[in-house]
Amino acid sequence: MEAKAQARFVRVTPQKARRVVDTIRGKGASETITQLQFAPQAAAEPVRKLVASAIANARVKADQASERFDEGDLVIAEAFVDEGPSLKRFRPRAQGRASRILKRTSHITVIVADQNRHNEGGR
């Protein structure tokens, strides 16, 4: 069983979000939620919510297909961060000038899969 969750237009820079996402890739989903709960990075909170959403999506898919569901078997099969649109803002500078500030956004995607199926696909 494979389930996906996406968070779009998250107000965190893609570079900072990738630092968090790189630490969870390939780990158990339950263990990941605990790890992200205590992570100091600001991007950890939206990623934790996203992993929880992916687990819930997997539970719903398993119920619809009448399959057995065990949260402990789920693994983060894929996790990646894409760049979203940047909000353009201006900041006053010396001598009446203005400089541009880019407030970057991210699109974060997490895919969870059964541990058995994840291992079979990686041969």
Image (cartoon, rainbow, N blue to C red):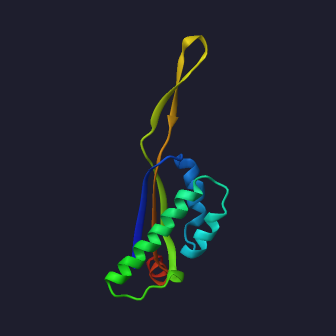
Q: Is residue 23 above or below residue 61?
A: above
Q: Is any atom of residue 28 visible in this view?
A: no
Residue 111, picture quadrant: bottom left
Where is the N terminus found, in terms of image quarters?
Answer: bottom left
Residue closest to the far top: 95
Q: Position of residue 15 (x, y in %)?
A: 56, 48
Q: Position of residue 25 (x, y in %)?
A: 55, 67
Q: Please tell me which residue is depicted at 50% across the width and 81% down the height of the picture.
A: 71
- Number of disc labels: 0
Q: Is residue 86 above or below residue 30?
A: above
- Between 113 and 96, the one lying in front of the other is 96
Decide if residue 51 is on the left or right side of residue 85: right
Q: Please tell me which residue is depicted at 66% across the width and 60% down the height of the picture.
A: 39
Q: Please tell me which residue is depicted at 64% across the width and 67% down the height of the picture.
A: 35
Q: Position of residue 105 (x, y in %)?
A: 47, 45
Decide if residue 75 is on the left or right side of residue 38: left
Q: Position of residue 84 (x, y in %)?
A: 43, 46
Q: Is any atom of residue 37 visible in this view?
A: yes
Q: Is residue 96 above or below residue 67?
A: above
Q: Please tell me which residue is depicted at 48% across the width and 59% down the height of the picture.
A: 80
- Between 73 and 46, the one lying in front of the other is 46
